[in-house]
Image (spheres, rainbow, N blue to C red):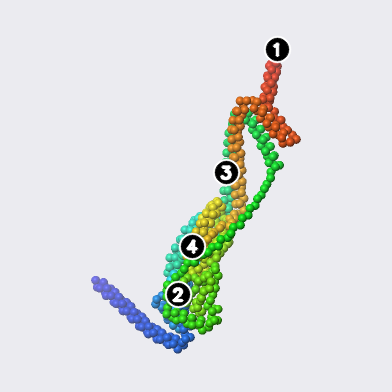
């Protein structure tokens, strides 16, 4: 019991000592803060005095301007200024005690270099991607991480490796969209603490080892060749059945066979006539269409924020400068943009009210206004050939053409760092993803549908950048040489099988018709002789040097019956002679 009391008292003494130590530290921190605040106040007064003594030159150092798409994070004696990041527009800093960092809020594009990844089924593949991200919180991106852009790019590489390493090869090839979405969520969650917003991730290319590509190509070629053999065998089977039925029909009526021979003679005559009398006429018609121009509609951008008082002062000073230096200043103040251009004007970093200017002449104030020219004409981007592995594991090379234009000049400058570069990278990744989720026969037969889907996807993705995708066209789909040969063999086998089936079905139908004709002729034997005479008349009109006279089948039948009777009579006589000799 005494030991428990002693231990309890010792514990209470230790707790009191800890509380005293914490209180002492807190008092020391408060003293330091009081001294720091006193020193800070003194330095601020000295800085203000320096500004007053060096007027008006100090104004050029104290007043700064950030653009509409930028923010300034200000540190005063190392501490973040209250109120968060400043901008857009003009802001004030104290010399010697204030420092600031500019942060660009526009969307950036990062092209991840190819990463060699070992998949879950132990296949080494090379994968690259494109990440679209922007700074969502300027203060956090400066204060919480040393280099937000570098950290985000390194994290994108590792996330790509980790995501691909947990998938099988067939999942990587067939589920690119879901993999891109998973990567986007993971990156967005990880970079949120750095003030970064990941907007989009696109898988560009998945390159397989050469040996694996050859093996997959050999597999596809073998499948095509096997399919060609099956098609040829099925065609032969159908043709054999049709010919067997035709032979059964002909066998039921011997006269139908004679009509078939006569029909062959008529067919031969027609072919000879076509051979010597064939004429070919080629007519080429050319028509010219008028090209229609597209007149883009530019949306207006409203800047509702009012400039600060000092901004108005600078505005008036700039006007006074223009008046004092007239007419020389007019050459700097008046600018001209063409019919197909617009000018996005920034006044002290803020977007000028009224949206983009143009076409025609517009006015800017020297020293406080800057502007950017934006071309609204339709641009053409020839997507370079992209090697894509289709859903059925066939490597093809595909290229396309994208037609796009700037639909909102203000957004294309303020929302994205380089709208054209971002659109072109997105076109490449969209082409790869679209082709990678299709089978080869779909790519070859559904080009219009694929082009339409690509246009819709690109238009939705680039709408936030002020870009309008007008048209997407698939240029060419190039297959490996071995696969081309296998597909040609398959197509040839299919056409030959179809030709055999068509010929056999024609023979079958002709046999049925000839059987009916033979039944009609069988009712009148003289009709068959008239058919022979008709054939002779047709042949004699061709001026041939050789005429074949068909021998009537009835005459042959008569001779055959006479020969059989004579043979039977001779056999009977020999039998009688042999009987007589044996009796003697």
Percent position (x, y) of residue 107? 48, 68
Residue at 59% x, 44% y: name it: 494
Percent position (x, y) of residue 119? 51, 58
Disc 4 to disc 3, how far (Cα)?
Answer: 46 Å
Label whose residue precedes the other's in the sequence (3 or 2): 2
Label whose residue precedes the other's in the sequence (1 or 3): 3
- Nearer to us of marks 3 and 2 is 2
The residue that label 1 is drawn on is: 580
Which of 416/187 is in front? 416
- Nearer to us of marks 4 and 3 is 4
- Nearer to us of marks 1 and 3 is 3
The residue that label 2 is drawn on is: 88
Label whose residue precedes the other's in the sequence (4 or 2): 2
137 left or right, relative to 266: left
Label whose residue precedes the other's in the sequence (4 or 3): 3
Label whose residue precedes the other's in the sequence (1 or 4): 4
Secondary structure category for the residue under label 4: helix
Secondary structure category for the residue under label 3: helix
* Residue 329 visible in the picture: yes
Crowding near pointer 3: few (<14 within 10 Å), some, many (20+)? some
Which of 420/368 is in front? 368
Q: Residue furthest bottom?
A: 53
Which of 413/220 is in front? 413
């Amino acid at each position: 019991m005494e030991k428990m009391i002693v231990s309890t008292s010792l514990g209470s003494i230790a707790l009191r000592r800890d509380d005293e130590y914490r209180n002492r530290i807190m008092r020391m921190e408060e003293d330091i803060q009081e001294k720091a605040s006193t020193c800070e106040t003194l330095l601020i007064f000295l800085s203000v005095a320096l500004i007053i003594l060096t007027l008006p030159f100090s104004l050029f150092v104290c007043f700064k301007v950030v653009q509409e798409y930028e923010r300034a994070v200000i540190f005063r004696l190392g501490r973040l200024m209250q109120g968060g990041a400043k901008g857009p527009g003009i802001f004030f800093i104290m010399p010697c005690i204030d420092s600031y960092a500019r942060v660009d809020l526009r969307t950036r594009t990062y092209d991840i270099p190819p990463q060699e990844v070992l998949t879950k089924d132990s296949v080494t593949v090379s994968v690259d991607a494109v990440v679209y991200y922007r700074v969502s919180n300027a203060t956090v991106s400066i204060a919480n991480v040393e280099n937000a852009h570098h950290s985000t790019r390194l994290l994108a590489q590792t996330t790509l490796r980790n995501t691909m390493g947990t998938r099988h090869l067939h999942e990587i090839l067939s589920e690119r969209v879901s993999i891109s979405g998973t990567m986007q969520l993971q990156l967005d969650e990880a970079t949120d603490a750095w003030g970064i917003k990941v907007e989009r991730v696109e898988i560009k290319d998945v390159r397989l080892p050469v040996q694996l590509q050859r093996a997959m190509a050999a597999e596809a070629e073998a499948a095509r060749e096997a399919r060609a053999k099956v098609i040829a065998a099925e065609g032969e089977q159908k043709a054999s059945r049709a010919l067997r039925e035709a032979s059964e029909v002909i066998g039921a009526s011997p006269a139908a066979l004679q009509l078939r021979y006569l029909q062959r003679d008529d067919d031969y005559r027609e072919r000879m006539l076509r051979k010597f009398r064939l004429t070919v006429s080629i007519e080429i018609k050319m028509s010219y269409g008028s090209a229609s121009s597209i007149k883009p509609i530019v949306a207006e951008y409203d800047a509702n924020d009012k400039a600060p008082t000092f901004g108005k002062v600078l505005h008036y000073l700039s006007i006074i400068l223009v008046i004092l230096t007239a007419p020389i200043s007019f050459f700097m103040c008046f600018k001209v943009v063409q019919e197909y251009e617009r000018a996005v004007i920034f006044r002290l970093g803020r977007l000028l009210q009224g949206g983009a200017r143009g076409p025609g002449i517009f006015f800017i104030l020297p020293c406080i206004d800057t502007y950017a020219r934006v071309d609204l004409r339709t641009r053409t981007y020839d997507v370079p050939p992209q090697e894509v592995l289709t859903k059925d594991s066939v490597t093809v090379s595909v290229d396309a053409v994208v037609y796009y234009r700037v639909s909102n000049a203000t957004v294309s400058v303020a929302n994205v760092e380089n709208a054209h570069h971002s659109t072109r990278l997105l076109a490449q990744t969209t082409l790869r993803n679209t082709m990678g989720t299709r089978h080869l026969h779909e790519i070859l037969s559904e080009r219009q549908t694929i082009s339409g889907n690509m246009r819709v996807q690109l238009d939705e993705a680039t709408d936030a950048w002020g870009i309008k995708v007008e048209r997407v066209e698939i240029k060419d789909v190039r297959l490996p040489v071995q696969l081309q040969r296998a597909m040609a063999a398959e197509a040839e086998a299919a056409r030959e099988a179809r030709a055999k089936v068509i010929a056999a079905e024609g023979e079958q139908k002709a046999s049925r018709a000839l059987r009916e004709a033979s039944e009609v002729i069988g009712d009148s034997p003289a009709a068959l002789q008239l058919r022979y005479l008709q054939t002779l008349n047709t042949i004699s009109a061709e001026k041939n040097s050789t005429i074949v006279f068909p021998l009537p089948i009835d005459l042959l039948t008569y001779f055959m019956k006479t020969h059989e009777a004579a043979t039977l009579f001779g056999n009977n006589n020999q039998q009688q002679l042999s009987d007589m000799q044996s009796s003697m």
